[in-house]
Image (cartoon, rainbow, N blue to C red):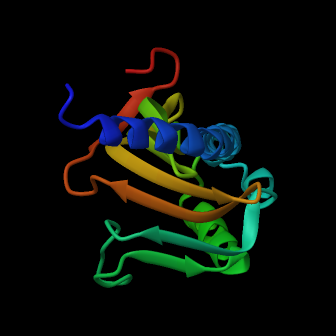
């Protein structure tokens, strides 16, 4: 105990000096999480207009796990609000999602990055009356917020082994 009294004093001073910065970071994280939760709710509901209102003009959108022959090894990428929204609207025009239906098991925030861990539970129209097509997969999404706007959106989905098939609209099975 007496071997490092100067170190103990230095640590106490450092902690007191860092406290205001940590408090400010906590406030920024809380604000980022509130914005990201609202944003992800709009994303889940396929409400592109509401989502767009929360995007910075120079937002970066990435889903490197969405590899395909058409997209290439880099997956989905959009630089800028207009490019990102064009990608999402084209997705809607092609697949007509009813909802993306995100279910988050865990959400945490660190340095204005809000990390969502859970599942996408997307529903799409089906030809059979009374049924919808469900595509469910593990998903991680990381949203970065700066100055009250989303500046980066990264999706990571398990495209290799999703659960998928027709489900009854009434029973959900």
- Seen in the picture, residue 46 relative to 128 is either above or below; the reply is below
Residue 166 vs residue 43, the one in the foreground: 43
Total residue callouts: 0
Whether residue 80 can be seen here:
yes
Whole-percent x and y of residue 130? 53, 28
Whole-percent x and y of residue 17? 58, 44
The structure residue drawn at horizontal position 48% and vertical position 44%, both measured from the top left corner, is 14
Q: Is residue 86 left or right of residue 67?
A: right
The structure residue drawn at horizontal position 73% and vertical position 54%, both measured from the top left corner, is 51
Where's the N terminus, which quadrant?
A: top left
Residue 3 vs residue 141, the one in the foreground: 3
Q: Is residue 94 left or right of residue 24?
A: left
The structure residue drawn at horizontal position 31% and vertical position 66%, both measured from the top left corner, is 65
Where's the C terminus, which quadrant?
A: top left
The structure residue drawn at horizontal position 62% and vertical position 48%, both measured from the top left corner, is 43
Whole-percent x and y of residue 144? 57, 58
- Seen in the picture, residue 86 relative to 24 is either above or below; the reply is below
Residue 9 vs residue 98, the one in the foreground: 9
- Seen in the picture, residue 55 relative to 29 is either above or below; the reply is below
Whether residue 132 can be seen here:
no
Farthest-out residue, top = 171
Whole-percent x and y of residue 12? 45, 35
């Amino acid at each position: 105990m007496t071997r490092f009294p100067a170190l103990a004093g230095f640590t106490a001073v450092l902690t007191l000096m860092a406290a205001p910065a940590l408090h400010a970071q906590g406030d920024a994280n809380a604000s980022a999480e509130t914005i990201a939760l609202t944003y992800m709710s709009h994303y889940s509901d396929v409400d592109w207009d509401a989502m767009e209102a929360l995007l910075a003009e120079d937002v970066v959108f990435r889903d490197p796990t969405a590899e395909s022959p058409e997209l290439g090894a880099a997956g989905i990428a959009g630089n800028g609000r207009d490019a990102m929204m064009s990608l999402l609207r084209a997705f809607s025009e092609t697949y007509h999602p009813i909802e993306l239906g995100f279910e988050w098991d865990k959400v945490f925030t660190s340095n204005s990055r809000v990390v969502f861990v859970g599942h996408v539970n997307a529903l799409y129209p089906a030809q059979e009356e009374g049924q919808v097509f469900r595509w469910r997969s593990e998903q991680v999404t990381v949203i970065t917020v700066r100055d009250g706007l989303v500046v980066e959106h990264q999706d990571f989905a398990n495209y290799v082994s999703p659960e998928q098939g027709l489900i009854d609209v009434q029973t959900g099975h």
